[in-house]
Amino acid sequence: EADIYQTPRYLVIGTGKKITLECSQTMGHDKMYWYQQDPGMELHLIHYSYGVNSTEKGDLSSESTVSRIRTEHFPLTLESARPSHTSQYLCASSAGGSSSDTQYFGPGTRLTVL
Amino acid sequence: KNQVEQSPQSLIILEGKNCTLQCNYTVSPFSNLRWYKQDTGRGPVSLTIMTFSENTKSNGRYTATLDADTKQSSLHITASQLSDSASYICVVSDRGSTLGRLYFGRGTQLTVWP
């Protein structure tokens, strides 16, 4: 079992609210990632980080933002949630950033915006 | 365009039976291929990883095969158990980027009935 945690596991909120999805890992991994996954669809990379103070946008355009102030913590923020943001958000980390490094996933946050 | 296609989309089998899941990819240049298991409401967990030179990799009752020439992989599950019910995701990495870009399939939803 990977030591990567996400909170909350489920979140139902109204349109226009600001939310932060938390992700933390205790493996000392430098690389962290956020993915978005809709039911029956593939995972899409929305943000990644090579280390502290490093963040980059992924392949899928997202209105969310991320920060990496500490190695173990990689929160994702939505300033004004909309129904189109309803999805599952998965956080992952890896020891390195090469293709041979396994990404370890957290349990995910299921977000529903009404 | 780099893609990963999985079949079947869903599969129902009886407990104790074997099954094989398929993955075709067009990712190039190829680095490695992973099979992940994703339980409902959880993050994906890596089952196997294979590089270009590997044809077969086993992990307990799970056996993955890779044909790099035809760009096909399969995951064979032997003597299925109820706990095997999950989505099985094929993930292919390229070696053309420093990030270790991952390409995800949409998964095969396996249901094992008693």
Image (cartoon, rainbow, N blue to C red):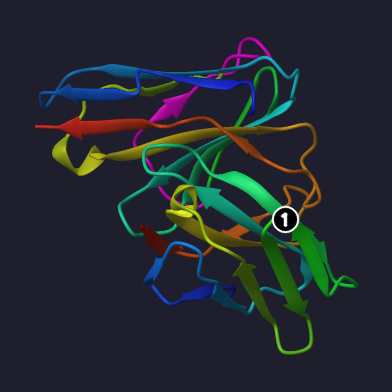
Foreground: B58 or A69? Answer: B58
Asked if residue B106 can be seen in this view, the reply is yes
Asked if residue B35 is positioned above or below residue A100 in the image, the reply reads below
Element class at badge 1: strand
Q: Main secondary structure of the magenta part?
A: loop
Q: Is residue A64 magenta?
A: yes
Q: Residue at x 58, y 75 (%)?
A: B23
Q: Position of residue B95 (x, y in %)?
A: 80, 61
The span shown in magenta is A59-73
Q: Residues within 10 Å of mark 1 (few under 14, many from 20)?
A: many
Q: Residue furthest top?
A: A70
Q: Position of residue B29 (x, y in %)?
A: 77, 72
* Relative side of B61 to B54, left or right: left
On-image quarter of the C terminus of chain A: top left
Asked if residue B95 can be seen in this view, the reply is no
Residue type at numbered disc 1: Thr
* Quadrant position of residue A40: bottom left
Q: Position of residue B27 (x, y in %)?
A: 66, 73
* Quadrant position of residue B28: bottom right
Q: Chain of mark 1?
A: B
* Quadrant position of residue B42: top left
Q: Which residue is the site of mark 1?
A: B48
